[in-house]
Image (cartoon, coloured by chain):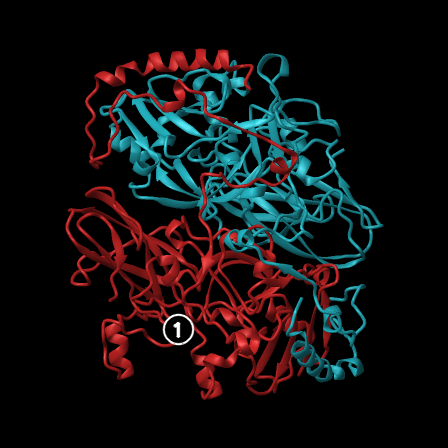
Chain colours: A red, B cyan
Amino acid sequence: MDPKSKSRRELLKGGAAAVGAVAASASVSKIAFAQTPASGALPSYAENEAPMIPLTDDLIGYGVRSHYVTSKRIPSTTGYAISPDEFGLSFHVATPLQDSIGTIQASSLHYTATTKKTFIPDIDPAKHTLMIDGLVDRPRIFTMADLKRFPSVTRFHFIECNSNSAAPTDKTVQQTHGLTSNAEWTGVLLSTLFKEVGIKKEASWFVAEGAEEEKGASTIPMLKGMTDVIVAYGMNGEALRPQNGFPVRLIVPGFEGIFNTKWVRHIKAVDQYQLNMNDYGHLNRTALGAAMIYQIGPKSVITFPSGGQKLPDHGWYEITGLAWSGQAAVKNVEVSTDNGKTWHIAELKNTPHPMAHVRFGYMWNWDGGEHVILSRTTDAIGQVQPSREQLAKALGVEFTPQYRPPGNNNTIMKWKIASDGSVTNGLA
Amino acid sequence: MDPKSKSRRELLKGGAAAVGAVAASASVSKIAFAQTPASGALPSYAENEAPMIPLTDDLIGYGVRSHYVTSKRIPSTTGYAISPDEFGLSFHVATPLQDSIGTIQASSLHYTATTKKTFIPDIDPAKHTLMIDGLVDRPRIFTMADLKRFPSVTRFHFIECNSNSAAPTDKTVQQTHGLTSNAEWTGVLLSTLFKEVGIKKEASWFVAEGAEEEKGASTIPMLKGMTDVIVAYGMNGEALRPQNGFPVRLIVPGFEGIFNTKWVRHIKAVDQYQLNMNDYGHLNRTALGAAMIYQIGPKSVITFPSGGQKLPDHGWYEITGLAWSGQAAVKNVEVSTDNGKTWHIAELKNTPHPMAHVRFGYMWNWDGGEHVILSRTTDAIGQVQPSREQLAKALGVEFTPQYRPPGNNNTIMKWKIASDGSVTNGLA
């Protein structure tokens, strides 16, 4: 397989000799890991060649992940499912937050929620158009090429399904919080297109419709459309994926996921709130009330250690997770390792952007005892993520260990660490 | 395929009626596209159902891109190729910058350069270790689990091959500049590990070796190792890809790509510069001289419109591209559409981070005439990207249209736009 292995072995032989002194040195670690390997042992492939992956034209053109990495999305246990009798099954798949690294989700792992369980649109971008009409001066139909001629924006934003909630019965963070994801989105501001078509002064709302069966329509305040909504064709450096709305979708920063219309094809400026297929969560509310609850509250969750994981031994770990708010950037994140008695300011790993995930970390020396660990977020406009007890009190309902807040649940998540290092849902 | 298409068609029928008024409206565009579609035409799928993609378990677990998106990496024409007689063929594949969107490259499209043309290491992360020894107090061997217990950092950085250069004979931006890519990297700072093992005061350099045949070794100043080098296991929100060093690599921000050792397994603190397989570009230079030229200069390139693309008609376009510096963040980018006679400050689309790509944009109303378009970067420490003429003068060599600067070529790139809208390399 490798005609040059001789020279490589010679190189390694030299390397092995050079590091021979290691064996005689004491191994003293400042962060004492119980599993510290015996000093002086050479990396395994120093004597055994690492296996090789043959490169094909396909792999050269578009690389894939290692076969050792098997992290995947799973059907959500908390996703809203429209009755199969009436509208067909829903497709809600949660991102594996327990394996998440950094601040964005790879496009292949970004959560998806849509109406149909088994099919998504297969749209030819050369034929796709976006029509903007209604209460406008110059109704227009934009091709994808048209959209790309306008000035672009590139921004980090999370999207979260309204149903992304922590239930005491869920076992993993993928199940409790996997219906939120963060990505770098590129597109044209909807406000740019609205200025192009000329919005009439009586247009106070707009309706966005996607090529998504019964579900893809939402009514959104015009103020939001004139602020930061993106008509996005790019995601994480390449074209959108079909499961995330290829060739174009709305990004409505901080609003419930369902408003981020995928496969968007029609936007209509209107003068009143319009009930539609997306209003299951907003029925019996006023238009103003509906608009006000669109925005995801300040929220955070610890992704490591989290349910189903196990700490191998006592000692130092970085407790890490994600924090976000639907109304501002994250200001700070606090972590508690004693069930909320004391709190510590966590380190933010990236620049907080408005309506985007922030990765936080807090170094913790686990003593091997039982602990309940928590995180809570304060956003830049001063809102603090509440506990379930606080929310129940605010809503005037009796709190029980099984309490699951209604709607957009941004309450504090708890993970319980047992003395054997195993981690379980700490809510119940 | 879709039992609910009846209700969908009814919905669409209502939509069609609602937008009937469009046909009677005048289509007046503020940004006049010649290809503005006829007002009143409905989106194509309003009457014809969009085809559907059936979702399999694999697609639900880990999504893929649309079959309409075929952007891919190609073998580099400018990559350094070690003589096949001596060391085997090299593997240099360039990212398709002409299709790039936003600021990062998707991991599947990130450029790769390594020694062997047809194989890359297939490393089991459970067996992989990183040894740090040499002039240290406490030599250590770290497992991947060990590395993940240290405090993490998440940062955007570009990597660029030293050979990434614009030649007058290259046709596309993928060929001229495709050996640079930008990603979100997550890992532990090398300085954290160095503090863990205790660097002796006489250690002024370190050598990093990867599991990469003959090539994977570099000598890097200890000052750099104590500053911002990352031992990275995460990339764009998931584990590194095999082609980018899975399970762990060095990120040496701003230094030539070859120092960003992939599949890193051994780091040795030493007291002098060590010549090794990576020094082809630095032979006959002093240690200090070698260290000084490691850093990529301030650089930029227009990715749209670029060679091989064609503007469909005169009118407004966003000239867009990427800018970076190996020694600081980007301060600003200027664009010229008259071969450098006049310059305009471009809009930066994302927050400039040190040693990371910035996306820039400049709106331009193309008059249909012949133009040569250019971009140039100034970084935060005041360095300005030079023209080829300026560099030739500084180096004391005679400039010719075919002049190709040696080594790390950060000179200004030109694209020529013909009156038919076709774009070609404007250097010659």
Q: Chain of mark 1?
A: A
Residue A9 x/y as whole percent: 45, 13
User: Relative to residue A375, is residue B243 drawn left or right?
Assistant: right
Q: Judge by depth and name the residue closer to the eye, A121 or A275.
A: A121
User: Relative to residue B329, is residue B203 drawn left or right?
Assistant: left
Residue at image position (55%, 85%) is A273
Does the rendering let one see residue A153?
no
Residue B93 x/y as whole percent: 62, 33
Q: Quadrant of the C terminus of chain B?
A: top right
Q: Quadrant of residue B410?
A: top right
What residue would you read off at disc 1? Answer: A408
Does the rendering let one see residue A180?
yes
Residue at image position (53%, 34%) is B243
Question: Compared with residue B200, is residue A260 higher up or lower down, i.e. above or below?
Answer: below
Residue at image position (68%, 81%) is B10
Residue B378 x/y as whole percent: 55, 43
Q: Of helix, strand and loop, which one carries label 1? A: loop
Residue at image position (41%, 38%) is B232
Seen as rendered, the residue at the extreme right is: B420
Please state the total of marks drawn on the protein image.
1
**Amino acid type, residue under disc 1 in the picture:** Asn
Q: Quadrant of residue B137?
A: top left
Residue B185 x/y as whole percent: 44, 43
